[in-house]
């Protein structure tokens, strides 16, 4: 895998780019972050996200331009550990949970995270939604021998927040998790049946190709389904069978006894 710096433009997919930078070990440069906005540069929740990722890694170096419109991110090793983060009230806690769950199997130390902020937001998946859908997918790839869980100590709604989350770690939101773990699997074939793919999932696949040089095969499920299963079709007809060969990701962060 190449170690050259990848460059991206704009604020979209900010958390995915940072998480994949850490997992791949590839430095990234993000430019033109809201450069034409009345408030150019990164927002407070994005700065909190960077700070959180610095806490669960060792050796990560971040440079933010004076205007905040450019971020240079050089990832360190994933350490994990016990971390407390105030997520503020701009974004739901699920915004911060996504990269943490992606990183959690590859930490040197067990990850125990306490996040304080908003658990339910009208335009984002809730923490309950993450717990209900993501952990089931997570456990298909990672042995749940440490009883991974997400616990909600109290709930907080916008605008004031006030909830606390303690934990560590297929609907459309969990497609990112499945695609990422299919990429990081041993060099073997993985299959996963997806429902309709939103644009976020499509861009996730594109980012995985950029960071890990992996190709995904997508087939319309109805075309490959056996005739005898026709009567068993349920749910959306817009299903796709996703196939990929893992990159054989080696977890150098964990000490094996």
Image (cartoon, rainbow, N blue to C red):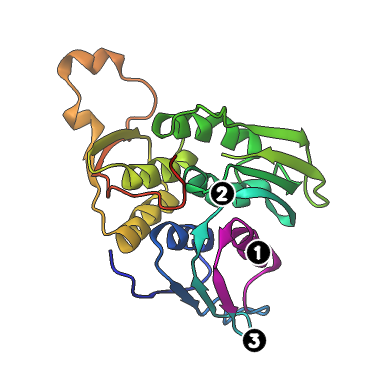
Residue 59 lies in the magenta stretch:
yes
Residue topped by disc 3 = 66
Disc 1 is placed on an element classified as helix
The numbered mark, 1 or 3, whose residue comes first in the sequence reads: 1
Quadrant containing the C terminus is top left
Per the model, the C-alpha gap separating discs 2 and 3 is 28 Å
Could you tell me which residue is drawn at 39 percent across and 67 percent down?
26
Q: Tags 1 and 3 in contact by the CB under 8 Å rule? A: no
Per the model, the C-alpha gap separating discs 1 and 2 is 13 Å
Residue topped by disc 1 = 51
Q: Choose top left, top right, bottom left or bottom right for residue 50.
A: bottom right
Residue topped by disc 2 = 100
Mark toward the viewer: 1 or 3: 1
Q: Position of residue 212 (x, y in %)?
A: 31, 58
The numbered mark, 1 or 2, whose residue comes first in the sequence reads: 1
Disc 3 is placed on an element classified as loop
Could you tell me which residue is drawn at 40 percent across and 49 percent down?
251
Q: Which residues are magenta?
A: 41-63
Could you tell me which residue is drawn at 71 percent across and 42 percent down?
119
Dot 2 alpha-carbon crowd within 10 angstroms: few under 14, some 14 to 19, many 20 or more: many
Residue 197 appearing in the image: no
Dot 1 alpha-carbon crowd within 10 angstroms: few under 14, some 14 to 19, many 20 or more: few
Residue 183 sits above or below residue 8 on the image = above
Quadrant containing the N terminus is bottom left
The numbered mark, 2 or 3, whose residue comes first in the sequence reads: 3
Disc 2 is placed on an element classified as helix
Q: Choose top left, top right, bottom left or bottom right for residue 64.
A: bottom right
Dot 3 alpha-carbon crowd within 10 angstroms: few under 14, some 14 to 19, many 20 or more: few
């Amino acid at each position: 895998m190449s170690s050259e710096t990848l460059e991206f433009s704009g604020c979209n997919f900010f958390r995915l780019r940072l998480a994949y930078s850490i997992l791949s070990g590839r430095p990234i440069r993000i430019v033109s972050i809201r450069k034409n906005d009345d408030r150019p540069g990164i927002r407070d929740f994005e700065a909190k996200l960077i700070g959180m990722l610095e806490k669960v890694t060792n050796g990560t170096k971040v440079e933010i331009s004076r205007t905040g419109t450019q971020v240079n991110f050089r990832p360190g090793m994933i350490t994990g550990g016990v971390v407390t983060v105030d997520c503020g009230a701009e974004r739901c806690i699920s915004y911060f949970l996504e990269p943490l769950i992606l990183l959690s199997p590859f930490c040197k130390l067990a990850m125990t995270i306490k996040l304080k902020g908003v658990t339910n937001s009208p335009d984002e998946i809730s923490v309950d939604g993450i717990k209900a859908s993501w952990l089931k997918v997570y456990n298909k790839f990672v042995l749940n021998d440490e009883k991974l869980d997400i616990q909600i100590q109290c709930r907080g709604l916008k605008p004031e927040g006030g909830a606390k989350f303690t934990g560590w770690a297929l609907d459309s939101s969990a497609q990112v998790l499945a695609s990422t773990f299919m990429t990081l699997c041993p060099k073997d074939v993985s299959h996963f049946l997806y429902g309709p793919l939103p644009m976020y999932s499509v861009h996730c696949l594109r980012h995985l190709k950029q960071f890990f040089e992996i190709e995904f095969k997508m087939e319309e499920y109805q075309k490959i389904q056996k005739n005898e299963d026709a009567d068993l079709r349920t749910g959306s007809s817009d299903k796709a069978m996703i196939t990929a060969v893992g990159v054989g990701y080696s977890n150098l962060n964990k000490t094996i006894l």
